[in-house]
Image: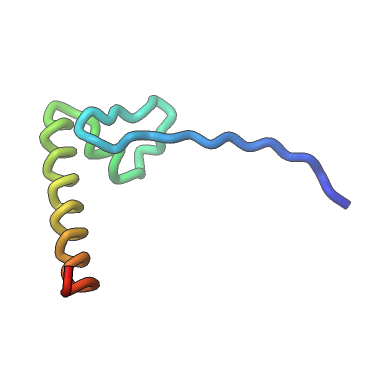
Amino acid sequence: MSQAFTFTLKRSCFDENYNPSENTRTTTNFANLARGEKRQENLRNTLGMINNRFNALASWDNPKA
């Protein structure tokens, strides 16, 4: 037995211009950073930390690069 189902894929760009929709859960960390007066600064700082961490892991994972 099979039942038909419907799904939707959505894509959000997580950059300093990210604006959460009104129905975004308030427990979503990235959405919380994107609210308030310093939203753009919060997002820049967070993206910088993510970038630094990825770069640190990339050199650890591929030391000959």
Question: Going by the image, does 1 lie left or right of 41?
Answer: right
Colour theme: rainbow
**Residue 20, placed above or below residue 4:** above
Q: Position of residue 45 (x, y in %)?
A: 12, 44
| Residue at 22% from the left image edge and 39% from the top image edge | 33
**Residue 50, placed above or below residue 4:** below
- Looking at the rendered structure, the number of numbered marks drawn on it comes to 0
Q: Residue 57 or 21: which is nearer the viewer? A: 57
Q: Residue 3 or 65: which is nearer the viewer? A: 65
Question: Going by the image, does 51 lie left or right of 20?
Answer: left
Residue 57 found in image quarter: bottom left
Q: Position of residue 38 (x, y in %)?
A: 12, 31
Name of the residue lying farthest toward the right: 1
Q: Position of residue 63 (x, y in %)?
A: 17, 74
Q: Position of residue 39 (x, y in %)?
A: 17, 31
Question: Going by the image, does 18 lie left or right of 40?
Answer: right
Q: Quadrant of the C terminus?
A: bottom left
Residue 54 found in image quarter: bottom left
Q: Residue 30 or 63: which is nearer the viewer? A: 63
| Residue at 24% from the left image edge and 34% from the top image edge | 34
**Residue 64, placed above or below residue 35:** below
| Residue at 53% from the left image edge and 36% from the top image edge | 9
